[in-house]
Image (cartoon, grey):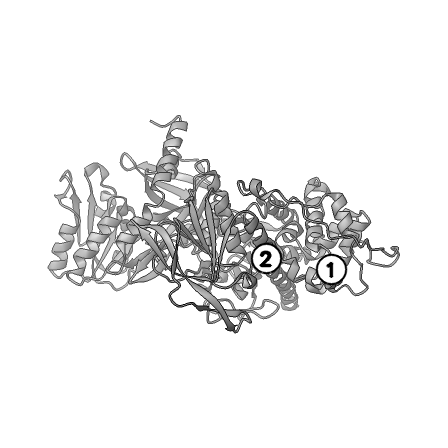
Amino acid sequence: MFTIIHKRQLSESVFEMGVQAPAIARKAKAGQFLMLRVDENGERIPLTFSDWSAEEGWIRFIFMRVGKTTHKLSHFEVGDALVDVVGPLGVPTHVDGLGRVAVVGGGVGAAVAYPVARAMVAAGNEVTVILGARNDDLLILEDEFKALPLTELIVCTDDGSAGRKDLVTAPLKELSAAGVLDHAMAIGPVIMMKFCAATTKEFDVPTTVSLNPIMVDGTGMCGACRVTVGGETKFGCVDGPDFDGHLVDFEELMSRQRVYVDDERLADAEYSRECSCHK
Amino acid sequence: MPQVDAPGGEKPRHKPSRGPRVAMPERPAAERARDFDEVNLGYTQEQAKAEADRCLQCKNPTCIEGCPVNIDIKSFIRHIIDAEYAEGVAVLKERNALPAVCGRVCPQEEQCEAACVLGKKGQPVAIGRLERWLGDFDLACELGERCEPEVGADTGLRVAVVGSGPAGLACAGELRRFGHGVTVFESLHALGGVLTYGIPEFRLPKAIVQAEIEMLGIMGVEFVTDVVVGATYTVDELLTEQGYDAVFVGNGAGLPVFLGISGENLNGVYSANEFLTRVNLMRGYEFPKADTPVWRGHKVAVIGGGNVAMDSARTAKRLGAEDVFLVYRRSEEEMPARKEEVHHAREEGIEFKMLCSPSRIEGHDGWVTGLVATRMELGEPDESGRRAPVCVLDSEFTIDCDTVIVAVGTRANPLLTKTTPDLELTRRGYIMADEQGATSKPGVFAGGDIVTGSATVILAMGAGKRAAQAIDEWLVTRSQ
C-alpha cells in the first residue's frame, strides 16, 4: 500500500497528489512515469512524475478528473492509501547539452513540463517555458515555474484571462523564427503537441514530445501503447514516452486514445451514480 | 504430515486393470463457452482410482524420464491405488511445487504420457489428470492438513528471485528447501506471472494459482509486488545495497511480437498479451464492476496456432463474439497448441482457417473492418522440420471482422537486461545461461522464457529448479 501524504486541488478538476514511495523516489528522473491502481477493482493507469524527493521518499503526480479512475482518485485524501504504485518507468527525458530550449506545457502537461524544465536548467541549458491553458483557472504550477531560473516564462491563455491571449504555438513560432532555439519540447494534449511539432518543423528546430498512449502494464508486455514513429511501431512505455515530434503519427495516436471513450463514459457515469460523495 | 515411504519394497505387486482410459469429465461446450468457469471438471475419487489402476507400475518407469522435473510418477500413482493420497501429494511436491497447476496446463501428451508403456499399443495412463486430482486433493484440505514441503535449516543467505511466474516460483520453493531466504519480486500487482495474466480462468482458475502460491508463502518465501527489477532496483543493487547473495532472473519473455503488416495499429487490434491481460489479470469481463474495459468484438480473427492463440479465441467467444476465426498459416497438424485445446476450441465453435497467411488489416475511421489473408499450401520441410507454407498466387481474400488478436509469440523484454550491462545476451536479447542457469555474471542465474524464448510452464519450472540447485552450490562454494 502507498500512503497519500499530500493533496492539493489546482483547479476545479485538476489535483496534485503525493505518495510515500521511497524506492521509486530514489530513482525517479524527469520525464519518467509511474503506473498506479487505486483499489482492488482498479485499472492500471500511467501518470508522469510532477515532482519527487529522494531524501524524503515521496513522489508526486498531477491528474485531471476525466474518467472513473481519476474520479475515484480525486476522492482519496491524505492518510488514505493506493493499492499499487510502480516505477519509475520509461526512458528519462534527454536533458544534457541541448543549449537553448523551449519547453511547452499545455494544460495538465505543465505537470510534466515542470520537472523537465527543472532538469534542463540543472543540466546547464537556457530554458524558456511556454505555459498554456484555456483560461486562468486552468493554469497550473505558475509559481513553481517562476521559481526556476528560466530565460523566460511565457504564459498564454485562450481567452486572455492570464498572460498573452494566444495559443502556445504563437510564442513558439516567434522563438523558432528568431533562431534562438536549439531544441523544443512539447508536453500536453496530443493536438497541441501535433501543432507544436508542425510549428518547429518549419524552422528545423528538433522537437521532443512526451506521449501519453493507453497502457495496461507499462513494462512492455501488452503493446497497447504502440505508436508509429517515422513509420516504425514503437512502444510508448519502454521506447518512450519521449519521441521525435517531427516523426510521430499524431492522427493515429489520437485515434488510438479514443478506443475506450464509450466504455470510460459508461464506467464513470455508473460510478457517479453509486458515489454518494459526488457533488 | 505422513512421511513418504520408500518406494517399492514391501508393497504387494499391483495388478493393472486393463480398463479403458478414464475420460476427463468436462462441461458441455454450449454451456461453458458462455462463461469463464473451468472447462475440465477433474476426476472423482472413483475415477482417479480406476485410472490409477491402469498403471502397470513398470520396473523401469520410462514416464519419469519424460517429465521435465522427473516426478516419481510411478510412486504417486501407486499411492492413489493404495488410497494414500496425502503421501501421493508429498511425492509430487518433492519435485513440483505447483501440482494442481501442472496437472492442468502441462503438455503431458508430449512428455510423461508419451513415454508411458501403455501408450505403445493403446492409451497411456492419464498421468496429468491424476496429478491434477492429487493437487486438487491437497488444495481441498484445511491449510494445516496440506502437504507442506520440508524447509531446510536457515543458512542465513538470501536470494532475490525476479518474477513470480513458473520459473521464479519453482526456484523459490526449491531454494527454501535448501534453507536459503528468498524474496520474490513481481512487477505486476498480482503474483503468478503468465499463470495469472496469461492463462485464462476457464483453463486454470486463479484461486488454484493463489492457493499454490500461498503454500510457498507458508514455506517462508517472501513476495513483493509492484517492483520492476531494472527500474525500481537494478540487479546490481539487489546484490549490493539490498543485501542479496544471489539473484535468479525469471522475468519471462515480455514483449509481444506483431506481424509488421499494415493496419496493425488500428483500433480493435490487440496483442494476445494485452487482450488476455485485460481479461485475466484486470478482469475485463466484469467491466464496469472492474474498472478495466476490454473491447468486445462481434467478429474476431485470432492470428496464430499456439496455446495462446487458442486461449485468445476461446476468451473472445466467452466475451460474446458471434464468430471467432483462428487464422494460421500452416495446417492444423503443424499447430503447436495442445491437441486438447484445439479440440475444445473446435467444440466451442471456433472456426479454423488453416493455411491462411495474413497480409494486411483493413479499417475504417480508425477501426478494424477486415483481415486480408492469402491462401497457402505446404511445401518442403523447413529447418523446424515442419513443412513450410508457400503462397498460392492470386488467392487473397478478406475475413470480415472488427477485432484482430495477434498471437504469434513474444520477444525479450529489455528492462532488466539493459540495466545489467555485464549480463551476456543472445543476438535476440535473451539471457545467455548454461544448463544450470548460470549467466555470465557471477551470482546471477536465469531461467524460463527469458533464456529460452516462449516455452511451456513446466520447462520454465524445470529451469527454475535446476537454477536453485546451482545457486545452492554456488552459495555453498562461495561461503567456504
The residue at the point 22 percent across, 36 percent down is A137
Q: Quadrant of residue A60?
A: top left
**Amino acid beneath label 2:** Arg
* Horizontal and vertical percent position of residue A117: 26, 53
Name the N-terminal-most of marks 1 and 2: 1
Circle 2 sits on which residue?
B338
Q: Let me know if residue B238 appears in the view.
A: yes
Q: Secondary structure at mark 2?
A: loop
Q: Chain of mark 1?
A: B
Reply above or below: A204 against B370. Answer: below
Task: Return the x and y of residue A15 as percentages of the image width and height.
Answer: 32, 38
Task: State the separation of the CA atoms marked 1 and 2.
Answer: 19 Å
Can you identify the residue that label 1 sits on?
A: B122
Q: Is residue A93 visible?
A: no
Do marks 1 and 2 share a subunit? Answer: yes
Q: Amino acid at mark 1?
A: Gly
| Circle 1: element type | loop
Q: Pointers 1 and 2 in contact (CB under 8 A)?
A: no
State the residue in front, B71 or B44. Answer: B44
In the picture provided, is A59 more to the left or to the right than B215?
left
Identify which residue, B238 or B188, lies in the foreground: B188
Residue B394 spot, x, y in % from top left: 37, 65
Mark 1 vs mark 2, foreground winner is 1
Horizontal arrangement in the rendering, residue A86 relative to residue B76 (left or right): left
